[in-house]
Image (cartoon, rainbow, N blue to C red):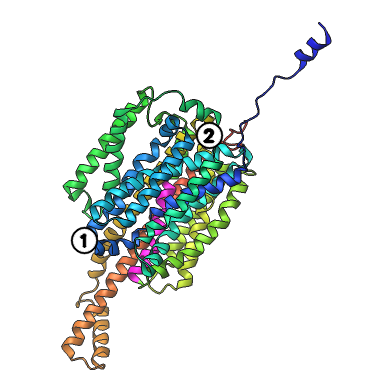
Amino acid sequence: MNSREESSVGAPPLVAAPWRPKVNPWLIGVVVALAAFMEVLDTSIANVALPYIAGSFGASNDESTWILTSYLVSNAIVLPIGGWFASVLGRKRFFMTCLVVFTVSSLLCGIAPSLSLILLFRVMQGAGGGGLQPMAQAILADTFPPQQRGLAFALYGITAVVAPTIGPTLGGWITDNYTWRWIFFINLPVGILTLLLVYRLVEDPPWVKRAAGAGVKIDYIGVTLLTLGVGALQVMLDKGQEDDWFGSHFILTCAVIAGVGLVSLVIWEWFYKAPIVDVRLFKNFNFLGANVMMFTLGIMLFASLVLLPQFLQTLMGYTAESAGLVLSGGGLLLLFLMPVAGTLTSKVQARYLIGFGWLTLSIAMYYSTQRLDLDISFGAASFIRVVQVFGLGFLFVPITLVAYVGMPTEKSNSVSGLINFMRNIGSSIGTSMVATLVARRAQFHQVYLVAHATPGQPTFAQTAKALAARLATSGLDASLATRQAYGRLYGALIGQATTLAYIDTFWVLSIGAGIMFLLSFVLKKNEPGGGGEVAAG
């Protein structure tokens, strides 16, 4: 054997360098995060404008709520199948297509001359937006090296968590100062700019290009089951409390269709060779656990996002803008905490960060039950939101990171689609849960308090008599003063019953976060800074 043969035998095997984009990953990250931010913002920005839109078209408030429902239904249907579309069209092409559909439909929503047309355009807008979130996350996962993946997800987390926080405040400001149509028109410059930047900067990795050229096989049965199941579920969640849940034949029908459709979807996709939704990923217990946690995080995020402003507006007389300002401190804190959490993922195992986040969130929700009352100040309410956000800031990034632990690189599109879908469904359930719990628990406490607020109760009778006497000194006759006294006491009773209902709801959130804290320790170890690599040992 000559020296050349010896050197070739002793040389280590050549390993192909991992794929990296041609431009700076952070530039790509900002561009795709901007697209996701625009889409997430639209899930909440229209909420406060519904009365104005209804007035423009001569529609009722109940009819105008379909503007939200139509968007959420189409959005939820597209989210889990984004990975399939990316494999067929190529991820960049699919991302750009979604941007075009979202931007054009935003323009159409802004110029819509009737309610029926704006509903149609909102369906289109939701479908276009449904592909932006998962593809943005998948692009970030593949663009950044493993040691920077936590920071990349922090950038995405800012869009997913902060955008819903500022949406209602921004929507209220635009509607009050301009017109509701501008909540759609503001998407146009952002959408056009993002589209041009994506075209110039983003590129598909080799494995995505190979998959895009492998041919198309459409799973018609899977698409049908997904559309029926997810669509019916979203309508049920959005309209349930309004229609008295299962007391309504419409909601009961939606529940049956959702249950049969989703169960059939899972069974069909599990055995189908080319599924449109890769449900077999849930065989990985770690991925399943991450999805359960992201689902719960969606509930916690939107439930807490709805609870505090709703309490302040309905019971404390805050305007939409003032209630939004209460949330602003928490939003600013998230801007700081997300990068911190992203940095910590390179030094600490994700499951420990997740455990810390759930524990602090559980404590924060318990703290909310102790501080919430009808005498709460603006500063105290703002501090409650800051305390709640502190726990949320340590959850989104590490949970997203854990979802990729042990997953093949070519599955990143499907992983991001499913985990975003679970968060969005959790968000819908959280919003519905808040509305139902507050309404039902307020009725419960009202019945209890009314039993102790009768003329036969000495304390109540003395209070009513004293209040009537004070009103009489202001010039009212005795009979009117007595009626007003009882009316005011009943109003105070309703306020106290509703406050207790909000406190009960925060108790439920605290218990739920505590359960997730225990679950966090059954997740697999990951290599800090490995971006989804399983830790040895």
Q: Nearer the viewer, residue 268 or 200?
A: 200
N-terminal of the pair, mark 2 or mark 1, is: 1
Residue of label 2? 204
Residue 240, compared with residue 448, is above or below; it is above
Magenta span contains residue 296: yes
Query: Looking at the image, is mark 2 or mark 1 nearer the viewer?
Result: 2
Q: Which mark is residue 60?
A: 1
How far across and down, in percent of the image, does residue 477 sit?
18, 91
Total residue callouts: 2
Highlighted range, magenta: 295-315
Is residue 271 at least partly visible in the picture?
Answer: yes
Tell me the SS state at disc 1: loop
Question: Residue 335 vs residue 269: left or right?
Answer: right
How far across and down, in percent of the image, does residue 438 sit?
31, 60
Distance from the alpha carbon under mark 2 to that under mark 1: 47 Å
Is residue 506 at least partly visible in the picture?
Answer: no
How far across and down, in percent of the image, does residue 39 sit?
42, 50
Looking at the rendered structure, the kind of residue marked 2 is Asp
Residue 470, compared with residue 369, is above or below; it is below
Question: Residue 87 vs residue 1: left or right?
Answer: left
